[in-house]
């Protein structure tokens, strides 16, 4: 009887000492639905000669929503601005290089309150054609913003709109 009482008491107080595993939550950047219908900002090609070819090799297109286009014109991007870097493989056959499969898209989404720690920008990378396979998550500060901080005078955005 005494051991049953001890067991009951232990089961009653055990939840008081349980420490739940800490789960870091972070603000997710939304997938940019329909971004290929937005304004095309510019394109480029990173070829095999580039030291960055392994990670950024291929054809890349940059798209901006209407709010981001206002930012390119003004030099400061309003909340709601979204910029997409769309990286595609670039197969060459018979001397002709074409767009291949998508490698990934990189998304910058401006929300000054949600992403205050990273200059007001949220960053994410979506693999291939997936809208859910994310690679940045809570590591945006070290994986993205530390580099983008060099562009503080340009509201943390590399490049410009090619008129």
Image (cartoon, rainbow, N blue to C red):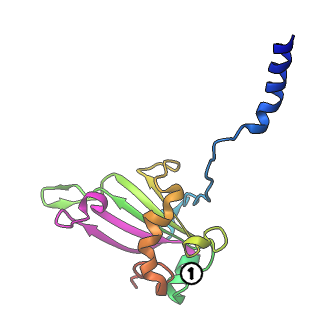
Answer few, some or many: residues within 10 Å of disc 1's Cα (few below 14, many 20 plus, some between 14 and 19).
many
Please state which of residues 87 and 95 is positioned toward the viewer in this rendering: 87
Give the side of residue 41 with respect to residue 58, left or right. right
Q: How far across and down, in percent of the image, does residue 138 sit?
A: 54, 57
Q: Is residue 47 magenta?
A: yes
Q: How far across and down, in percent of the image, does residue 26 sit?
A: 61, 57
Residue that label 1 marks: 77
Which residue sits at x=30%, y=54%? 100
Quarter occupied by residue 32:
bottom right
Quarter occupied by residue 50:
bottom left
Residue 144 to residue 14: above or below:
below
Q: Is residue 154 magenta?
A: no
Judged from the image, the secondary structure of the residue bearing numbered disc 1 is loop
Which residue sits at x=57%, y=73%? 81
Residue 19 to residue 71: above or below:
above
Q: How far across and down, in percent of the image, does residue 6 sit?
A: 82, 20
Give the side of residue 19 with respect to residue 24, left or right. right
Which residue sits at x=30%, y=71%? 44
Q: Residue furthest top?
A: 1
Residue 53 to residue 24: above or below:
below
| Quadrant occupied by the N terminus | top right
Please state which of residues 72 and 55 is positioned toward the viewer in this rendering: 55
Q: How far across and down, in percent of the image, does residue 66 sit?
A: 57, 76
| Quadrant occupied by the C terminus | bottom left
Q: Residue furthest left?
A: 94
Magenta segment: 39-66
């Amino acid at each position: 009887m005494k051991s049953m009482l001890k067991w009951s008491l232990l089961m009653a107080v055990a939840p008081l000492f349980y420490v739940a595993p800490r789960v870091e939550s972070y603000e997710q950047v939304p997938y940019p639905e329909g971004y290929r219908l937005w304004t095309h900002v510019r394109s480029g090609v990173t070829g095999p000669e580039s030291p960055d070819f392994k990670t950024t090799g291929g054809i890349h297109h940059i798209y901006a929503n209407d709010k981001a286009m206002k930012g390119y014109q003004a030099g400061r991007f309003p909340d709601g601005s979204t910029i997409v870097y769309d990286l595609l493989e670039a197969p060459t056959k018979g001397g002709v290089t074409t767009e291949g499969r998508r490698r990934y898209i990189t998304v910058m989404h401006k929300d000054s309150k949600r992403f205050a720690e990273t200059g007001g920008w949220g960053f994410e990378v979506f693999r291939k054609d997936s809208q859910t396979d994310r690679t940045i998550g809570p590591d945006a500060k070290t994986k993205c913003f530390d580099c983008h901080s060099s562009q503080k005078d340009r509201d943390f955005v590399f490049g410009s709109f090619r008129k």
